[in-house]
Amino acid sequence: MTDSPLRIVVAKPGLDGHDRGAKVVARALRDAGMEVIYTGLHQTPEQIVEAAIQEDADAVGLSVLSGAHMTLFAKVIELLKTKDAADIVVFGGGIIPEADLTELEGMGVAKVFTPGATTTEIVDWVRGHVAV
């Protein structure tokens, strides 16, 4: 283990234009001492994976409010595997029905934060589950 801070890519995939939550999480992770790269709105899974690889990210946090979470998480995970980068932890949050959480976990999403999750909870989880 090194003393380097965790590098986290925070991304807004798809057509969803609401990024306040993603920015709040990005700021909380940054304030906790992590290096955070926020990709901005309307990113494709390909752009997100490319950014994660280029930035040597330890994790990717996806914020999905559009209802396309099953497709978007699956595509990001598939692309990471294809690019030999499956060691990058994928987590996320948003308006995601509880019924979908088990399937997302089964496809390799490490954690999904639903509405009501605190930034402290998210920071603590990242610290505890993303290794450098």
Image (cartoon, helix red, strand yellow):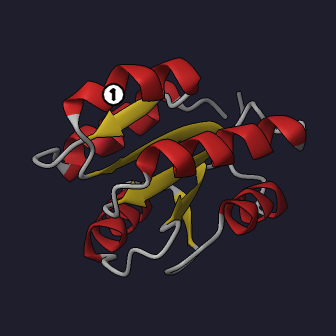
- Whether 3 is drawn above or below 104: the answer is below
Q: Residue at x 35, y 73 (%)?
A: 23
Give the amino acid type for the residue marked by disc 1 in the picture: Leu
Element assignment for label 1: helix
- Whether 79 is drawn above or below 21: the answer is above
Q: Position of residue 66 (x, y in %)?
A: 34, 63
Q: Position of residue 86 (x, y in %)?
A: 76, 32
* Camera sees residue 3: no
The answer to whether residue 60 is left or right of residue 92 is right
The answer to whether residue 90 is left or right of residue 25 is right
Q: Residue at x 34, y 44 (%)?
A: 123
Q: What residue is shown with label 1?
A: 101
Q: Nearer the viewer, residue 32 or 69?
A: 69
The answer to whether residue 92 is left or right of residue 46 is left
* Camera sees residue 40: yes
Q: Position of residue 58 (x, y in %)?
A: 66, 43
Q: Residue at x 52, y 66 (%)?
A: 13
Q: Quadrant of the N terminus?
A: top right
**Residue farthest along the left direction in this orientation:** 116
Q: Residue at x 89, y 36 (%)?
A: 84
